[in-house]
Amino acid sequence: MKIWAKMWLDTHLIKDTTVEVNDESLNRTRKIFKAIDQICYDYDLQKPVWLDKNIDEFKARSKTRFSQDNFIESIDFDYLEIQVLEE
């Protein structure tokens, strides 16, 4: 599975990365969580909280955005977007 993470500020892409998770013993959800763990480690972020809107959006489009509502600490960007590129 390949996940693309993009950090946005004022409609500008300020950071992006691609994370691959090739552990066949994990199901899709665990692969996504593992990728998010790696993204948060790389960007020095706390892990975002999945709200119902994120779950629904991700199920429908394999893509979602995490804004300030998803983080306990304050963030210095508008949102973090993750998208599945390849399964």
Image (cartoon, rainbow, N blue to C red):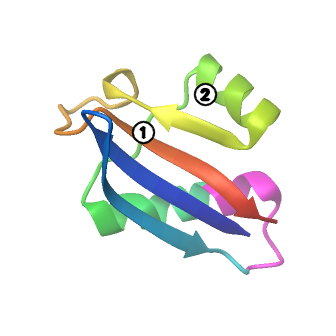
Q: Do the residues labelled 1 and 2 touch (CB within 8 Å)?
A: yes
- Residue span colored magenta: 23-32
- Residue 36, placed above or below residue 75: below
Residue 47 image position (x, y, % from top left): 40, 46
Quadrant in the rendering for residue 4? bottom right
**Element under label 1?**
loop
- Amino acid carrying label 1: it is Pro
Residue 67 appears left or right of 63: left
Q: Which residue is drawn at 55% across and 72% down?
A: 19
Residue 26 painted magenta: yes
Q: Which residue is drawn at 83% across and 78% down?
A: 24
Using the image as rendered, state which of residue 1 and residue 34 is in the foreground.
Answer: 1
**Element under label 2?**
helix
Q: Residue at x 40, y 62 (%)?
A: 16
Quadrant in the rendering for residue 68? top left
- Residue 50, placed above or below residue 16: above
Give the label, 1 or 2, closer to the camera: 2
- Amino acid carrying label 2: it is Asn
Mark 2 crowdedness (10 Å alpha carbons): few <14, some 14-19, many ≥20: some
- Residue 29, placed above or below residue 35: above
Residue 29 painted magenta: yes
- Would you name the residue on which mark 1 appears? 48
Residue 79 image position (x, y, % from top left): 36, 35
Residue 55 image position (x, y, % from top left): 68, 29
- Checking the image for residue 71, the label placed there is none
- Checking the image for residue 54, the label placed there is 2
- Mark-to-mark CA distance, 1 and 2: 10 Å
